[in-house]
Amino acid sequence: MRGADSGDGGLYGERTTTALNAWSSVNGATLSVIAESSRVSSALPNALHVVFPTGRTGPVGFANAGYFGIKVTPSTTYSASFFYRFPTASSFRGTATLSLQTTSGTILGSSNVSISGAQTSWQQLTVQITPNVAPPSGSTANRFVLSLDGASAAGQTVNFALLSLFPPTFKGRPNGMRADIAEVLVEMGPSFFRFPGGNNVEGQTVAQRWQWNNTTRYAILLQRNHNKIHSDAFQGRVGDWSYVNTDGLGLLEYLNWCEDSGMEPIMAIWAGFALGGTSVAEAALGPYIQQAADQINFAIGINGTSAAATLRASLGHPEPFKLTYVEVGNEDFFASTSYVYRWRNFVTALQSQFPQLHFIATSNTFNPVLSPVPTEYDVHVYQTPLWFAQNSFFYDGFQRNGTKYFEVTTLNSSPSMGKFTQYLIKGRVRRDDQ
């Protein structure tokens, strides 16, 4: 199974989105995004600034529409949390109501928590919401709402940050996978899982690449007192598909997912190429190779032998994870010329540190010629149904030298695609000694 890219809005359990167009006012509250003078973390300079108007009664606040709505299941417990602070101390004491509602305002479930105007530093509050009303016809046209009583909150100003809503997660993992999707995937019986996706690992620029150490920050926060926030928590980055990736689904979560589901992990490392066309010069690869080594050590290093392995142990997994395969880059036929030196430098350095691992190449097979010689290739085929029907002998031309090949990907999503991919699969089975 291929990785689910960033996971946001899908396999990753988090149901709220950071997209600006997902936020809306409830009953006249004034919303603005401000540069915070006192940040939740150094990576989050902004906050949601909410002014509660005078002359309003009933719930006043704001809502988040989630990723194309929010699936709400009655009698299921959702975990909701948020950070808040009053920019200026006030005598206000009241109740914040967190609720799941239809877009027309029907409350499906709610929970209350006390907040205080004396709280001028950031505080995180967490509640459980168990809906007792079903949305009409199972509709996902629902939203997550935070509100105060309009009359008692009149004139107050409150800053909010990091609102979160999680349904039950697979195996009950904090910050884990959405249980309903994960369980269906596991029932399909996949034998492996490649992460953190394909293009997701590369980024459009070098700065926007996936970086394992940026994805462990939420896990670090979960292990700490909520009032002592890790300085770089929740950085996120611009993704490859026009939205911001939270990177809340990170390396630890991927490794736990593979372990919990019994899938063989195939872990990709960034290999010096960004989708915008940048290849890092050979002389400048050193820091990126070290980052890849740290990523591998986080997964399989012995506790106490490296900072990365010690970090993993501190996050609740003292024993190394199972890991045999590391994929070097993604679809490097787009930059095959530079892949020659990038592959050579990454694999030579990493093989010396981790001789037990298999490193998978992502260029076209044996073109260009790579050294060290790859033991495995990740083969990506994007074609039409007709192409598959006409190329059942595709694998016959592959070298029969013990090299292993895996993965076929398709562009056409027509219902008949399964029938046509069978031609290629049969040809591959026929060459099963490869």
Image: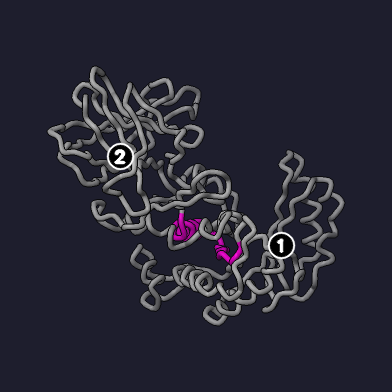
Residues rendered magenta in the picture:
250-273
Instruction: Return the residue at label 1.
Output: 333
Circle on res. 286: none
Q: Is residue 75 above or below residue 333?
A: above
Whichever of callouts 1 and 2 sits on the residue coming sooner in the sequence is 2
Residue in the image at 61% along x and 74% along y = 282
Circle on res. 160: 2
Residue type, label 1: Phe
Residue type, label 2: Phe
| Viewer-nearest residue: 170 or 279 | 279
254 to the left or right of 98: right
**Can you give x and y, in whole percent of width and height, for residue 83 in the image?**
29, 43
Q: In this view, does 62 lie above or below 78?
A: above
73 to the left or right of 272: left
| Viewer-nearest residue: 91 or 137 | 91
Residue 269 magenta: yes
Task: Characterize the local packing of mark 2: few (<14), some (14-19) or many (20 or more) Cα atoms within 10 angstroms.
Answer: many
Residue in the image at 20% along x and 36% along y = 114
Circles 1, 2 touching at the beta carbon (< 8 Å) = no
Give the SS element for disc 2: strand
Give the SS element for disc 1: helix
